[in-house]
Image (cartoon, grey):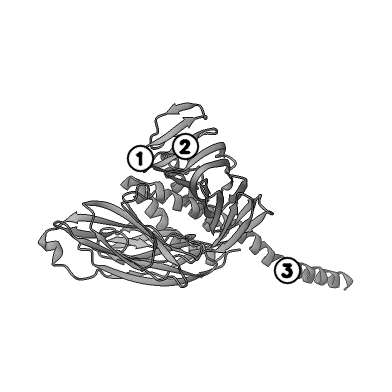
Amino acid sequence: MKVIKISVLVLILLLLISIVAYPVYLHVMQRQSNKRVFESLSLLQKAFVVAKLDEEKSKLNKALDKTKELRKYMDHYDFKKTDQLSTEIYKVANAVMQAKKSAVMSGAHIAQLVGEVNYLEGGTRVVQVESNMKIRSGDVLTMKKGAGVEIIFIDGSTITLRYPASLVFTKIEENKISHSLNVSMELKNGEVSFTASKITDYQPKFELAVGKIHVLYSLNAMGRASLNASLLTTTVACLEGSLLVQGGERDRKLGPQQILRVSNTMMETVYSLPPMPLAEEPANYKTIETSGKGKIQFRWSKVYNAAGYVFELADNTVFANCLARRNGYSGTSLTLPLPGKGTYYWRVAALNEASERGHFSDIREFKVVGTRQHELLVDQTPPPLTLEPIRIFGTTAIVRGRTEAHARVTVNNQLVIAKDDGSFSAIITLYQSGKNRIKVIARDASDNETMLEKWVFIKIY
């Protein structure tokens, strides 16, 4: 009898242990599985950016289609199948990444070049500047009038320089194996804009010296710094994330939409930057027909309490040698002569009471072409547009839908071309904890468009 009681007690104890241990086991397995899924989707998203060949895009789209099953396995705690499928997706994305000498895998280099740039290799030897040129420790870049460059690092982080900027790269250390990045720079003149990659599998670290000020930034940061020799001031602006500014009266941490101005005597002033205006017309990727000279109207949303706006129009995304620029413009619409045939880019930012500009709007692209054939012009029917339920994996969103065959679709300004059957898929990253807007626009060959908006909720830990 005693043995039976002991056996029963042992069974009860084992049952209690299993009841307690099983949720812990599920939690641990789920975290490990989710980590593999996020790694796979992060690489898949990067692969879409660098894929150029139709064959590569086809493979990536097939991998993207598998995320439907991935969500089903995750919801049913089928860790074995989840891991197996996420591994398959990772292999497809990795094969594309390895096949491309992309910005993410090829190291620091000039991604975009406009005009003439003085380039001292190692600070001593004059070199002819070309696109895709490697940037190394000790290199010095000085913009000539009308020039600008965008430099991209191994993790996708970028810096942008425009005339009259001059920058010294005192150190560049990039490690593909440890996924680390360590860059030090010194701004000698002008302004530098920077964006730190939001890709979490890299550990970027940037240090920027501007006069007597040192700016430290890493993952998710975006901002700019400028050195004005005539006014003897240094300015550091944080647009996203956070920046640590060392020097001045004391070390400061700048948050989003904050700007610090430091005088030559180290006197400091901190301002709040105005919100980012929304660039409305002409819409992104719009095609404008012309048979000669005409006018084009640019329109953007009003920013409360803005002291004015900065408007820029250029034929390059660096906005070097702008075709039109207005600083301190008071209105929210601007009419300009229609430029000649070609592709153009525009953006707008608001100014605060100290004439410091806030975050530029997303860059809008439009194309000017000759008058198209009549059969394209008579079509005034907007394309159909339907969306499937949006699937969320952490901060990654999978957006699928259907529209007219071969229509141009933008998902939060990311361009996707619909397939023969009108279906399309896009993978995007959401950066804001809480409510996020996903805006989908479909445009047919006659530039008719249909727009849908969806809101999703995510939590960033």
- Find disc 2 in the rendering and name its residue: 141
- Find disc 3 in the rendering and name its residue: 20
- Find disc 1 in the rendering and name its residue: 115
**SS at badge 2:** strand
Distance from Cα at disc 2 to Cα at disc 3 = 62 Å
- In the shown orientation, is residue 438 left or right of residue 441? right
Q: What amino acid is labelled 3 in the image?
A: Val
Q: Nearer the viewer, residue 356 or 77?
A: 356
Q: Nearer the viewer, residue 149 or 383?
A: 149
Q: Which is more foreground, mark 2 or mark 3?
A: 2
User: If you read the primary sequence from the N terminus, does the residue marked by circle 1 or circle 3 appear first?
Assistant: 3
User: If you read the primary sequence from the N terminus, does the residue marked by circle 1 or circle 2 appear first?
Assistant: 1
Q: Nearer the viewer, residue 29 or 15?
A: 29
If the image is split into quadrants, where does the N terminus sit? Answer: bottom right
Q: On screen, 55 above or below 64?
A: above
* Percent coordinates x, y for residue 406 in the rendering: 25, 59
User: Residue sitting at 31 percent across and 50 percent down?
Assistant: 315
Q: Residue furthest right?
A: 2
Distance from Cα at disc 1 to Cα at disc 3 = 67 Å
* Percent coordinates x, y for residue 331 in the rendering: 36, 68
User: If you read the primary sequence from the N terminus, does the residue marked by circle 2 or circle 3 appear first?
Assistant: 3
Q: Are marks 1 and 3 in contact (CB under 8 Å)?
A: no
Q: What amino acid is labelled 2 in the image?
A: Leu
Q: Which is more foreground, mark 1 or mark 3?
A: 1
* Percent coordinates x, y for residue 122 in the rendering: 52, 29
Q: On screen, 222 above or below 101?
A: below
Distance from Cα at disc 1 to Cα at disc 2 = 13 Å
* Percent coordinates x, y for residue 145 in the rendering: 38, 41
Q: Is residue 83 at all visible to an observer of this figure?
A: no
User: Residue sitting at 43 percent across and 48 percent down?
Assistant: 47
